[in-house]
Image: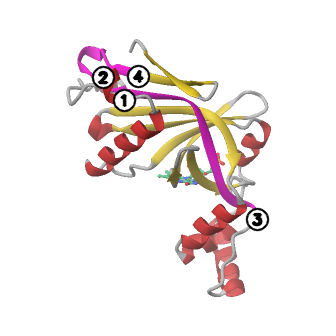
Amino acid sequence: MSSKHIADIRTDYRLAKLDENETGSDPLMFFARWFAEAEQADVREVNAMTLATVDNNFQPHARIVLLKALDKRGFVFFSNYDSDKGHQLDVKNAAALVFFWPELERQVRIEGLVEKISEAESDEYFLSRPEGSRIGAWASPQSRPISNRAEIEKNYSKYTKQFGKNIPRPAFWGGFRVLPNRIEFWQGRSSRLHDRICFTLYNDSWSRVRLAP
Ligand SMILES: Cc1cc2nc3c(=O)[nH]c(=O)nc-3n(C[C@H](O)[C@H](O)[C@H](O)COP(=O)(O)O)c2cc1C
């Protein structure tokens, strides 16, 4: 395979610009504004974000998860607490998140510490999920090797029979909240002279700088 054509793939970003005075002083509020704009622009899988964690050898691991809630405290996603990411967050409760919204030529990078959300919050979200997804949480020992696909399909049938319509949240499944201490907004610009506005939390207040692209 020749990679020549890969080297030739490039986009010159011309849609918009990002000014310091647009962002205001609260990056969570500004994130909510950008998120709403991404929804309005019909960005596909707008709440999909890359989640990076590290293991005890400092090896980074990254994968996509879905943002399911956002408030003043931070960014919530749901997963299996017993998965690889769950174990990595037990070892080091820090993470990075990345959103890329190509339709708007925007990226947002978030870094911070991670905590488990309350059991009540996890229950509330779990019970709002479709039945199939709730059974799926029980059926899949996420991140563990399985002998074949039939194994989880068998689990799925087993739990469907076992629970009927009353599917409780497994104790090994729930939410994590990333409490941000750094949030960077990136707007693509022409000739690679992109705009980068970065917020850092010091003593409970956000400071803002522009970074070179
Ligand atoms: C679009 C998309 C959305 C996903 N959303 C989630 C999610 O919200 N929670 C989750 O645990 N895994 C989600 N996954 C699967 C993860 O990327 C990953 O395969 C899984 O969580 C296992 O990761 P781990 O072995 O590093 O723990 C999603 C994958 C994709 C492509």
In the image shown, does 45 or 139 lie closer to the viewer? 45
Residue name at image x 26 percent, y 21 percent = 189
User: Picture quarter containing residue 91?
Assistant: top right
Q: Earlier in the sequence, mark 4 or mark 3?
A: 3
Q: Does the magenta-highlighted stretch encompass residue 195?
A: yes
Is disc 1 placed on a helix, strand or loop?
A: helix
Residue labelled with disc 2: 19
- Give the residue type at disc 4: Ile
- Tell me the distance, in whole angstroms, between the alpha carbons under discs 2 and 3: 45 Å
Mark 2 and 3 residues: CB-CB less than 8 Å, in contact?
Answer: no
Q: Which of marks 2 and 3 is nearer the N terminus?
A: 2
Looking at the rendering, the stretch of residues picked out in magenta corresponds to: 171-197
Residue labelled with disc 4: 197
Residue name at image x 65 percent, y 87 percent = 164
Q: Vertical placement of 138 versus 46: above or below?
A: below
Q: Taking the image as drawn, is residue 38 in sight?
A: yes
Is disc 3 placed on a helix, strand or loop?
A: loop
- Give the residue type at disc 3: Ala
Residue labelled with disc 3: 171
Residue 179 located left or right of residue 118? left
| Quadrant in which the C terminus appears | top left
- Tell me the distance, in whole angstroms, between the alpha carbons under discs 4 and 1: 8 Å
Mark 3 and 1 residues: CB-CB less than 8 Å, in contact?
Answer: no
Coloration of the structure image: secondary structure
Residue labelled with disc 1: 23
- Give how far across and how far down residue 124 sits, in percent: 61, 68
Residue name at image x 32 percent, y 50 percent = 39
Considering the whole magenta stretch, tell me its main secondary structure.
strand
- Tell me the distance, in whole angstroms, between the alpha carbons under discs 3 and 1: 40 Å
Is disc 2 placed on a helix, strand or loop?
A: loop
Mark 1 and 2 residues: CB-CB less than 8 Å, in contact?
Answer: yes
- Tell me the distance, in whole angstroms, between the alpha carbons under discs 1 and 2: 7 Å
